[in-house]
Amino acid sequence: MPRRTKPTPPTVALFVRHGQTPTTGAVLPGRAPGLHLADAGKDQAQAAADRLAPMKNVAAVYASPLERTRETAAPIAKALGLKVHVDKGLLECDFGEWTGRPLKELMKLPEWRAVQRYPSSFRFPGGESFSEMQTRITDTVNRLGHQHPGQAIVLVSHADPIKAAVAHALGTHIDLFQRIVISPCSVTAIAYGELSPTVLTVNSTSSGLDGLKPS
């Protein structure tokens, strides 16, 4: 009989949303350049770094190219003794013509109902659909995970891509992903193994992260 090969241990993806910015909760910034962390966001990023520092199996830190994600990733990478690698697959959803518009203005549009309740049916004018965003983030996680089998990786991204990754891992339709909350500098952990993903924690903003592994 052929010898059975030992399964590869899962890769644990530690998703971190960027810290608070001056426009968080007021504007849809999207991919517009030049948006940096607020002082509160810098404090949140350092707190996230302090929480992740005890994790000895983190092999790499990746971040979206935008300033707010790279500024969040910097103290995390420093605490872990690693460098920040920029990956475009972790970018925010492309909101197209909605980029930079106030949320209170967008909420008055008839399309807002589709964004919240039927996101699979919606494409941002001149931008990306939520389904395309979900495919992009899951493909990115799979690609990066294969580079670090059996280890942990930190992925500093944005709320909507992280929510989409969680929905995919749970087998939840993208139309329900708006029910997931991802707070600034929260940690969401998903183990990607040879079988289906295992969601270990979502939107964690306090307490230790030691011992995160499938039960």
Image (tube, rainbow, N blue to C red):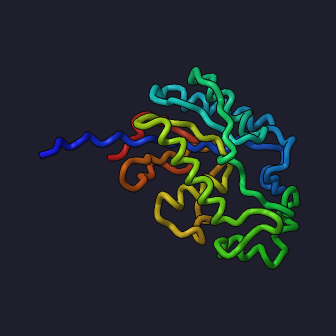
> Among all residues in the image, which is located at the extreme left?
1
Q: Position of residue 162 (x, y in %)?
A: 61, 52
Residue drawn at x 56%, y 55% is 165
Name the one closer to the observer, 177 or 3.
3
34 vs 73, left or right, is right
Q: Would you place residue 28 above or below residue 187 in this image?
A: below
Q: Position of residue 92 (x, y in %)?
A: 72, 52
Q: How many marks?
A: 0
123 vs 142, left or right, is right
13 vs 130, left or right, is left
Q: Would you place residue 95 above or below residue 90 in this image?
A: below
Q: Quadrant of residue 108?
A: bottom right
Is residue 181 visible in the rendered image? The answer is no
Residue drawn at x 63%, y 32% is 47
> Among all residues in the image, which is located at the extreme bottom?
110
Name the one closer to the observer, 144 or 151.
144
> Among all residues in the image, which is located at the extreme top?
81
81 vs 115, left or right, is left
Q: Position of residue 167 (x, y in %)?
A: 53, 61
Residue drawn at x 54%, y 26% is 53
Q: Position of residue 142 (x, y in %)?
A: 51, 48
Residue drawn at x 65%, y 49% is 183
Q: Would you place residue 75 above or below residue 176 in this image?
A: above
Q: Would you place residue 95 above or below residue 153 in this image?
A: below
Is residue 205 visible in the rendered image? The answer is yes
